[in-house]
Image (cartoon, helix red, strand yellow):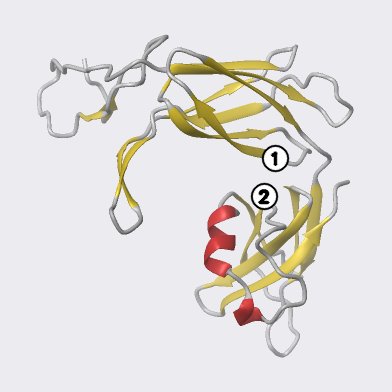
Amino acid sequence: SVGKAWLIGACAEGYAPSDEESLTRFRVPEVEVRLVLPERGGAIEGRVLAPDGEPLAGAVIRADVGFRFEPYPNGGMVILNSLRVQTRSSAEGAFRFSGVQPGDVELSVESAGLGGWHGKIVVIAGTCTRVEASLQEAGAVSGRIVTPDGAPFAGALVLASLRSAPERFVPHADWLDQDWSTFLQETGAFTATRSGADGSYRLTGLAAGWSYVMAESLDAGRGVEPFVAVAG
């Protein structure tokens, strides 16, 4: 029975996930869909550690275990499949993903009050890749959004990057000399809030290192300001 689902796929231990099939084209209450596990897959096992080195329970681990693509001859790619899943670390800090597509897999780990961990894991068919993610104390950024005449601006959308990019941002360089296209792509995970009645905002959970905060509204446009997040 299809119910309210609009996509369907399959995964199994030892195999790469199937392509996702759309159910939106069906107009009957029950359908039959053939799903093919395309090749042998791998697995990811790991452990999440707190800043003191002890196992961390309840952390959220996310991965795209079904990502497949074909590269274009002159750069870029066409995405063939994607299967984003998540799990939580056990009391021992352990986690596991099975039935993972071989190749590069983006992995992220988050826990309330701590800076996030992000990495690229190489998965090989028929093997289990081990990873250890050590979370650090989170940094924070706070400030005020004001209009050109200095008045507080309430309700602006304020975003900050959860990832740092120390190799891509050049301190004290002119704005136009920064490699913003690469920097924004590599720091593509965000936390967000709205400025208060007095224009104030505060964002937490930031990784230590160079980052940026961005504020925007439909009426006033957008502003971006780089800063250095310090753990704790």
The kind of residue tagged 2 is: Leu
Element type at mark 2:
loop
User: Is residue 18 among the parts visible in the rendering?
Assistant: yes
Q: Callout 1: 10 Å neighbours few (<14), some, many (20+)?
A: many
Place residue 37 in its image quadrant: top left
- Is residue 53 depicted above or below 183 in this figure? above
Which numbered marker is on residue 159? none
- Is residue 141 depicted above or below 49 in this figure? below
The kind of residue tagged 1 is: Gly
In the visual, does 79 lie left or right of 191? left
Front residue of 112 and 108: 108
Contact between labelled residues 1 and 2, with CB atoms less than 8 Å apart:
yes
Where residue 45 appears, as percent x and y from the top left, is: 60, 17
Kindly identify which residue carries mark 2: 162
Kindly identify which residue carries mark 1: 116
Where residue 150 appears, as percent x and y from the top left, is: 75, 85
Front residue of 222 and 164: 164
Place residue 70 in its image quadrant: top left
Gap between marks 2 and 1, in whole Å?
A: 7 Å
Q: In which quarter of the image is the N terminus?
A: top left
| The furthest residue to the front | 73
User: Is residue 5 among the parts visible in the rendering?
Assistant: no
Q: Residue at x 50, y 17 (%)?
A: 43
Where residue 154 appears, as percent x and y from the top left, is: 67, 70
Q: Residue at x 89, y 28 (%)?
A: 52
Where residue 174 appears, as percent x and y from the top left, is: 68, 82
- Is residue 107 depicted above or below 174 in this figure? above
Q: Residue at x 70, y 40 (%)?
A: 116
Q: Callout 2: 10 Å neighbours few (<14), some, many (20+)?
A: many
